[in-house]
Image (cartoon, grey):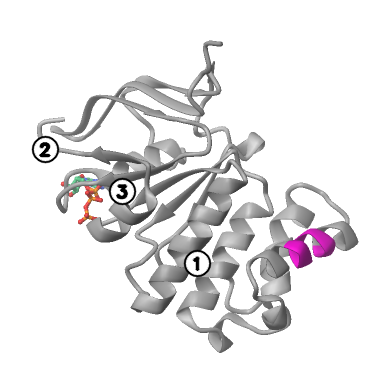
Amino acid sequence: MNKQPKLQLKNVTKTFGTKVVLDCLNLSVETGSILSIVGPSGVGKTTLLRTILGLEKVDRGQFFLDGIAFTPQDHSQNNVGIVFQDYRLFPNLSVMDNLILAPVRVQKKSSIQAQQEAQNLLDLLQISEQAQQYPFQLSGGQKQRVAIARSLILRPKILCYDEPTSALDSQNRQQVANLLQQFQKLSMTQLVVTHDLDFARQVSDQMFELRSEQ
Ligand SMILES: Nc1ncnc2c1ncn2[C@@H]1O[C@H](COP(=O)(O)OP(=O)(O)OP(=O)(O)O)[C@@H](O)[C@H]1O
């Protein structure tokens, strides 16, 4: 069987003014794998992630999901989810309300259904006790789990993390590694932008090293 990669980028080029950041970049991510994007500072890791998320428009290139072309700027399918480095939780909403906001407002799910799904994710991520707390009451690791749950509730086909270990101590770092591996067993395809080479080597089964000449 000719199995298609979960995500494929073909000849993606991105410039800022005269600076070519991504030059005819090709990338393929297999279903259920964890791909780490590594490379020196300023090489274009975040830019690459932002193009996949549709937050940066590319100059040229194509994106495929399960072999079918897609436009990253079209967010209607929730193809790609993101856990930002600074989590970006809504400070004035409880954990539960952070999770159900988009399912209710954007996906038009009933509040009861969204709460049930949120509860299942909070259980999976072992933060159900924090459901009624506010972000300022959470530890860094707990905030990250809420951010992961908030992405997962939209059922993305690919989940991306931007520097997931940068704000964590070694114990929480290991917990994130365990979590990624747990999601991998559920066949989730995951992309990790990281400076943390040890973490990348520990969790990923594919490494993509961006070099300045790429
Ligand atoms: N909006 C923008 N306008 C102009 N130049 C930009 C913009 N965003 C990024 N760049 C430039 O593109 C290059 C790649 O930046 P990017 O943030 O993707 O690198 P990075 O590999 O993620 O770096 P770091 O590891 O330090 O976070 C840098 O030279 C940066 O200055």
Which residues, given as a range, are shown in magenta? 115-120
Q: Which mark is residue 71?
A: none
Most extreme residue toward the left is: 213
Could you classify mark 2 by the number of other residues whose Cα lies within 10 Å: few (under 14), some (14-19), or many (20 or more)? some
Q: Residue at x 84, y 62 (%)?
A: 116
Most extreme residue toward the top is: 1
Q: Measured along the vertical axis of the image, is residue 134 above or below residue 34?
A: below
Where is mark 2, residue-wise? 212
Choose between 78 and 5: the one closer to the eye: 5
Q: Residue at x 66, y 68 (%)?
A: 98
Instruction: Provide the secondary structure element on which disc 1 rests.
Output: loop
Q: Which mark is residue 88?
A: 1
Choose between 164 and 21: the one closer to the eye: 164
Q: Position of residue 180 (x, y in %)?
A: 49, 55
Disc 3 to disc 2, how far (Cα)?
14 Å
Q: Position of residue 165 (x, y in %)?
A: 36, 66
- Cβ–Cβ below 8 Å for labels 1 and 3? no
Under mark 2, the amino acid is Ser
Disc 2: residue Cβ within 8 A of ligand 1's nearest atom: no
Q: Residue at x 52, y 32 (%)?
A: 31
Instruction: Give left or right: position of 6 versus 169.
Output: right
Where is mark 3, residue-wise? 46
Instruction: Give left or right: position of 41 versus 118.
Output: left
Going from N to C along the chain, the mark reached first, 1 or 2, is: 1
Disc 3: residue Cβ within 8 A of ligand 1's nearest atom: yes
Instruction: Give left or right: position of 55 versus 36.
Output: right
Disc 1 to disc 2, how far (Cα)?
30 Å
Going from N to C along the chain, the mark reached first, 1 or 3, is: 3
Is residue 71 on the magenta stretch?
no
Instruction: Provide the secondary structure element on which disc 3 rests.
Output: helix
- Cβ–Cβ below 8 Å for labels 1 and 2? no
Instruction: Provide the secondary structure element on which disc 2 rests.
Output: loop
